[in-house]
Image (tube, coloured by chain):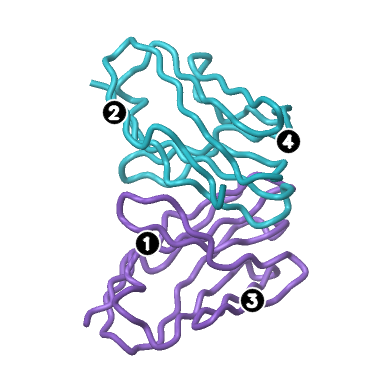
Amino acid sequence: GAGVSQSPSNKVTEKGKDVELRCDPISGHTALYWYRQSLGQGLEFLIYFQGNSAPDKSGLPSDRFSAERTGGSVSTLTIQRTQQEDSAVYLCASSLASWYEAFFGQGTRLTVV
Amino acid sequence: KQEVTQIPAALSVPEGENLVLNCSFTDSAIYNLQWFRQDPGKGLTSLLLIQSSQREQTSGRLNASLDKSSGRSTLYIAASQPGDSATYLCAVQKGTYKYIFGTGTRLKVLA
């Protein structure tokens, strides 16, 4: 596609449920990132993929968060047993390689009620 | 720990003015610096990427400069327009991949 695509654009879930957020990066981009933007806060790094490998998972807030990337393309961020503090906009970005310009998707707004 | 600060936090200017947004960072050992804009409820749009070996980049009415030694970058917007209204974010790349973001400058250009 022309840009980074994320789905769903909005997700409302009940506390305790699991959610999956999807990211389709720009074709050919080997680097993929997940960030989180909480209300009134800056962007927080979650995880970085190079190909299908995640050399840096240091930003994942807890073991309820996990992410995978398959075929060097699509990535899924999974949050288990969601909590209200997980409510945020989750942004995905990709770049041709990690030192190239990063392009962001429109984000998934997650609301945990 | 790398910290990125953007000043001012908010700015309101009349249409046509030239303006400067500031970004400062505490650790000069950065790889790249990238400027983004974010419209309300939207994702980030890349504006300019400055590599560590570069001093400035230009795109249309935008010019970004980088002074690594002083830990500063500026984004210059010429002849501002109402459509430039957005939040502007700078991000420094620590190592070869992780971006550390500033908290942004909210710009409003009045018609």
Q: What kind of residue is marked 2?
A: Thr
From the top left corner, tell me how far across and down residue A25 is, in percent. 59, 41
Q: Which chain does tag 3 point to?
A: B
Q: Colour of chain B?
A: purple
Q: Which mark is residue A111?
A: 2
Q: CA distance from mark 4 to mark 3?
A: 27 Å
Q: Which chain does tag 2 point to?
A: A
Give the crowd class for mark 1: few <14, some 14-19, many >=20 residues within 10 Å. Answer: many
Q: Which chain does tag 4 point to?
A: A
Q: Nearer the viewer, residue A3 or B100?
A: A3
Q: CA distance from mark 3 to mark 2?
A: 38 Å
**Mark nearer the N terminus (2 vs 4):** 4
What secondary structure is found at the residue carrying circle 4?
strand
Q: Which mark is residue A20?
A: none
Q: Nearer the viewer, residue A28 or B106?
A: A28
Q: CA distance from mark 1 to mark 2?
A: 22 Å
> A85 above or below A50?
above
**Mark nearer the N terminus (1 vs 3):** 3
Q: Chain in cyan? A: A
What secondary structure is found at the residue carrying circle 2?
strand
Question: Which residue is identified by label 3?
Answer: B57
Q: Quadrant of the C terminus of chain A?
A: top left
Q: Residue furthest front?
A: A1
